[in-house]
Image (cartoon, rainbow, N blue to C red):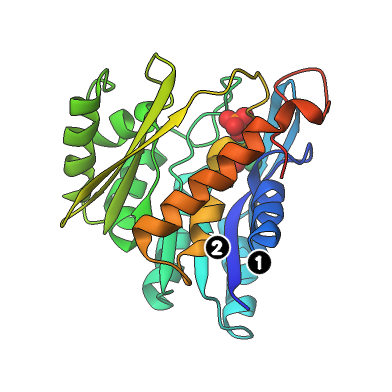
Amino acid sequence: MTIALTIAGSDPSGGAGIQADLKTFSALGAYGMAVITALTAQSTQGVSDVFPVPADFVKQQFDVLINDSNIDCLKIGMLMNEAIVNAVAELLSQNPLPYVVLDTVMVAKGGHALLKQTAIDVIRQKLLPLATIITPNLPEAAALLNCPEATNESQMQQQGQALLQLGCKAVLMKGGHLPGDECPDFLITSKEIIRYATRRVNTNNTHGTGCTLSAAIAALLPVLTLGEAIKQAKDYLSGAIANADRLHVGKGIGPTHH
Ligand code: PLP
């Protein structure tokens, strides 16, 4: 069985972060492990506070696992600060893993910061080159490139190419922030550009969609080609969003249905 590790933040409401990652791993047939980078106090109504784990203890959590198990794939989510980004980059340089999906988490949908501004440079310089694939949405791509947000598909592709130049092996540019009935995503590698289009689902319950997608890609990469892993991960997320309104969790932006 695939062993999938997530290094990310905790969402006690269960819709995003570590909790979403573990549900996704299980649903896709992988055994899930989790290194926690930060505790959040949050509900479906938003994040009220964040308590980062000391970087040394993030390292300690990883070290004991890597010495004990063969980890097949890694998803990286919320990292919160420079010290944790540096620690994760160091761990991965010393212990390369076969597949690394870097979800460049920066801000929660409600607006609360999940990454300090000063940590973006360290992600760009140290972590991006260690990633098999990064999965930025449009504001995250713009922050990584220090440029205005893409407003059309051609700019999305250009920004994806520019991110590839920073050293990751592939980029999944997520176009959910573009207006329209369709959400276009682009997979960009040095060899090809693949466009994936998904019809927008009319629901307010989209908490944790980015976490779920990146965890799904990580769980599927050891068993599928990159293009097929993304297609199936997107199908999994689409199903989770399509069924989200059946859940009735909380009073705010509810979770998707795994
Ligand atoms: N909480 C944690 C721990 C997360 O990792 C994330 C997203 O990555 C969120 C909250 C925010 O999720 P969303 O923006 O989908 O509401």
Tag 2: residue type? Ala
Secondary structure found at label 2: helix
Please say if 40 is above or below 216: above
Residue shown at the point (61%, 20%) measured from the top left: 110
Residue shown at the point (41%, 74%) measured from the top left: 98
Choose the circle earlier in sequence order: 1 or 2: 1
Q: Nearer the viewer, residue 1 or 35?
A: 1
* Image quarter (top left, top right, bottom left or bottom right) of the N terminus: bottom right
Q: Position of residue 200 (x, y in %)?
A: 50, 23
Residue shown at the point (58%, 76%) measured from the top left: 63
Please say if 51 is above or below 178: below
Q: Position of residue 252 (x, y in %)?
A: 75, 18
* Image quarter (top left, top right, bottom left or bottom right) of the C terminus: top right
Secondary structure found at label 1: loop
Q: Are marks 1 and 2 in contact (CB under 8 Å)?
A: yes
Tag 1: residue type? Gly
Question: Which residue bears the numbered disc 1?
Answer: 29
Q: Position of residue 146 (x, y in %)?
A: 24, 29
Task: Please indicate, yes or no, whether residue 78 appears anywhere in the rendered image.
Answer: no
Q: Quadrant of residue 95?
A: bottom left
Q: Quadrant of residue 211?
A: top right
On screen, residue 70 versus residue 226, left or right, reads right
Q: Position of residue 27 (x, y in %)?
A: 69, 57
Question: Which residue bears the numbered disc 2?
Answer: 219
Q: Nearer the viewer, residue 49 or 183?
A: 183
Q: Marks 1 and 2, Cα distance to the nearest angstrom?
A: 8 Å
